[in-house]
Image (tube, rainbow, N blue to C red):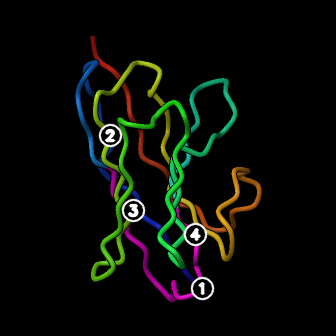
Amino acid sequence: QVQLVESGGGSVQAGGSLRLSCAASGDTSSTYCMGWFRQAPGKARERVAARDNRDGNTYYADSVKGRFTLSRDTTENTLYLQMNSLKPEDTAMYHCAGRTGTCFLSPDLYNLWGQGTLVTFSS
């Protein structure tokens, strides 16, 4: 049973940075795709970034390209999301997710989820 635990959320000002972490435990050998989704109040959950561990291909939402960077530490089995130049519209609950197979866009196709970590803005 794979478990995902996120951390690193918090309150930031516009232009600030945060690094989210997703620690995976259990047998992750078949969890080929790992990524981050976010859900803002009243909005659908959207994929922010994902990485296919089989070939290293990484995918980003257009809204975060150039600002967010996804990386993976294989020794610690941890996925990171470095978020720079944060904007108020980045406010959301961020969830780590995984699945066996291709990195699809739809959150409905991911079977592994963490509890989420909240990113908010302070004026």
Marks 3 and 4 sit apart, C-alpha to C-alpha, by: 13 Å
- Near mark 4 (Cα within 10 A), the count class, few <14, some 14-19 or many ≥20, is many
Marks 3 and 2 sit apart, C-alpha to C-alpha, by: 14 Å
For badge 2, the amino acid type reads: Met
Nearest the camera: 3 or 87? 87
- Near mark 1 (Cα within 10 A), the count class, few <14, some 14-19 or many ≥20, is few
Marks 1 and 4 sit apart, C-alpha to C-alpha, by: 9 Å
Of circles 3 and 4, the one toward us is 4
Q: Which residue is rendered at x = 63% and y = 40% of the image?
A: 46
Nearest the camera: 46 or 2? 46
User: Counting residues from the N terminus, which is met first, the one under dot 3 or under dot 4?
Assistant: 3
Q: Which residue is mark 2?
A: 83
Q: Which residue is mark 4?
A: 33
Asked whether disc 3 touches disc 1, contact meaning CB atoms under 8 Å apart, the reply is no
Of circles 3 and 1, the one toward us is 1
In the rendered image, which quarter contains the C terminus? top left
Q: Determine whether, in the image, residue 111 is placed left or right of residue 75.
A: right
Q: Callout 2: helix, strand or loop?
A: strand
Above or below for 110 versus 44: below
Q: Which residue is mark 3?
A: 22
